[in-house]
C-alpha cells in the first residue's frame, strides 16, 4: 500500500507543494486524534465566542484552526493562510510561494453529536508582489487552485486530494500513523438518483429551485422520470465524499432568509476546493447560473450558491434556472 509521501513524490513535481500538503496531512492526524477522544480531551462544546461569520465557534473549531495556522506558518513555503475562523488573512513567510485557505472543521455543529466532520483546504500560488497578509493576494478564481482536498473524520479518517491530475483517496492507518493510498483516479457518475439539500429552507428558495426539487419529489411520475433518494448530513465534507463515492448532487442555494448573501457556503475554502475535486473526478460545480471555478472573489469570506455533483444533474439544475 503506497504511503502519502511516496505518492506525492511520484505525482507532484513541486517539492514545496508536496511539503504543504504533507503538513496539512500531519496536522489532520492530531485533529483526528482529538476528535476520537471527544469528551475525554475536553474538546466538545462551545468556545463561547463568535467567528467573523457570526457563527458560534466550537472549542474544536478554534483548536483545529490554531493547529493548521501554526503548523503551516512554520513552513518556509507558506506565504500566508486564510481561514473561516480568522477575520483577516495571516501573513507567514515573505519568501513563501503558496497561500493556503481552509475551513478547519467543517460541519462542526455535528461534533457534539459524534457525527462526521471534516477539514477542507485549498492551495493557491502566492503573488510575488503581495504580502501574505494582504487579502488581495487570495482573490483568485477557483480555477487557479494548485491543489485542493479534504480530510473526512468519519468511521475512517480519509484524505481526499487533487493536485490537478485526478482525485486520490488515502486512509489513515492509525496503527502506524500513516495515510495509505486507497482509491486512484476517482470518477463520479454522470447520472444520479440521490440529492442532498436542507428541505426545511424550501419556502425561502427561488422559484426555479422550488420547481426542480418539487420535480425530484414527484419521482417516476414527474418530468425527471425516476425515483430519487435524499440525504442531508449537515456536513459538506460527508456529502461530497458520498457523491465522489456513489454519485449524487449537493445543493445549498441562495435563499431569502438573508437575501443580500448569495448563499450560506463560503466560496474560497468550501465551494472552490470541493468543486475542483468534483470536476477533477468528472463532476461539476455551479452557482446554478455560473461555473463556481470562474467566480471572481471580492473577499476571502465571500459566500456563494452551491450546486455540486454528477454532471448531468448539475446541468439539469442549471436548465431550470435558465427558463
Ligand atoms: P444547515 C456546516 O455548517 C456547513 O457549512 C456545511 O458543512 C453543511 O453542508 C451546511 O453548513 C449545513 O447547513 O443550514 O443545514 O445547518
Image (cartoon, helix red, strand yellow):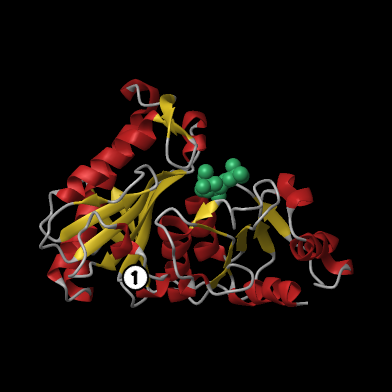
Question: In which quarter of the view is residue 272 placed?
Answer: bottom left
Question: In which quarter of the view is residue 130 placed?
Answer: bottom left
Count numbered badges in the picture.
1
Q: Position of residue 221 (x, y in %)?
A: 89, 68
- Of the pair 53 and 239, the residue shown nearer to us: 53
Question: In which quarter of the view is residue 220 placed?
Answer: bottom right
- Of the pair 73 and 90, the residue shown nearer to us: 90
Tell me what residue is drawn at x 41 percent, y 70 percent.
Answer: 142
The correct choice, above or below, for 16 with respect to 39 in the image is below
Q: Position of residue 143 (x, y in %)?
A: 40, 75
Instruction: Work out which quarter of the rendered image holds the C terminus and state it.
Output: bottom right
Q: Position of residue 14 (x, y in %)?
A: 16, 73
Tell me what residue is drawn at x 77 percent, y 66 percent.
Answer: 208
Q: Residues within 10 Å of mark 1 (few under 14, many from 20)?
A: many
Q: Position of residue 117 (x, y in %)?
A: 45, 43
**In the rendered view, does 164 fall on the left or right side of 198?**
left
Instruction: Work out which quarter of the rendered image holds the N terminus and state it.
Output: bottom left
Q: Confirm whether residue 235 shows in the render.
A: no
Amino acid at each position: 500500500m503506497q504511503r502519502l509521501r511516496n505518492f506525492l513524490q511520484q505525482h507532484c513535481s513541486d517539492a514545496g507543494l508536496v511539503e504543504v500538503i504533507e503538513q496539512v496531512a500531519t496536522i489532520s492526524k492530531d485533529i483526528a486524534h482529538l476528535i476520537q477522544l471527544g469528551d475525554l480531551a475536553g474538546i466538545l462544546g462551545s468556545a463561547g465566542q463568535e467567528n467573523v461569520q457570526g457563527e458560534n465557534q466550537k472549542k474544536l473549531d478554534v483548536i483545529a484552526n490554531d493547529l493548521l495556522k501554526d503548523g503551516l506558518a512554520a513552513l518556509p513555503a507558506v506565504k500566508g493562510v486564510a481561514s473561516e475562523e480568522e477575520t483577516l488573512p495571516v501573513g507567514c513567510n515573505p519568501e513563501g510561494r503558496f497561500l493556503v485557505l481552509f475551513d478547519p472543521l467543517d460541519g462542526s455543529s455535528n461534533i457534539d453529536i459524534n457525527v462526521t466532520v471534516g477539514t477542507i483546504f485549498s492551495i493557491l500560488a502566492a503573488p510575488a508582489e503581495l504580502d501574505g497578509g494582504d487579502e488581495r493576494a487570495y482573490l483568485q478564481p477557483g480555477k487557479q487552485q494548485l491543489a485542493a482536498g479534504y480530510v473526512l473524520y468519519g468511521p475512517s479518517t480519509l484524505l481526499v486530494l487533487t493536485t490537478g491530475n485526478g482525485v486520490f483517496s488515502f486512509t489513515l492507518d492509525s496503527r502506524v500513523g500513516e495515510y495509505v493510498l486507497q482509491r486512484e483516479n476517482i470518477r463520479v457518475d454522470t447520472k444520479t438518483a440521490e440529492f442532498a439539500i436542507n428541505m426545511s429552507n424550501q419556502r425561502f428558495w427561488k422559484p426555479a429551485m422550488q420547481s426542480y426539487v418539487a420535480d425530484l419529489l414527484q419521482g417516476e411520475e414527474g418530468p425527471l422520470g425516476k425515483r430519487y433518494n435524499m440525504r442531508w448530513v449537515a456536513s459538506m465534507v460527508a456529502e461530497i465524499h458520498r457523491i465522489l463515492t456513489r454519485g449524487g448532487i449537493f445543493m445549498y442555494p441562495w435563499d431569502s432568509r438573508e437575501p443580500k448573501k448569495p448563499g450560506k457556503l463560503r466560496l474560497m475554502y468550501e465551494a472552490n476546493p470541493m468543486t475542483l475535486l468534483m470536476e477533477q473526478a468528472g463532476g461539476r460545480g455551479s452557482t446554478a447560473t455560473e461555473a463556481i471555478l470562474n467566480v471572481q472573489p471580492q473577499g476571502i469570506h465571500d459566500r456563494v450558491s452551491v450546486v455540486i455533483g454528477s454532471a448531468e444533474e448539475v446541468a439539469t439544475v442549471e436548465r431550470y434556472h435558465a427558463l
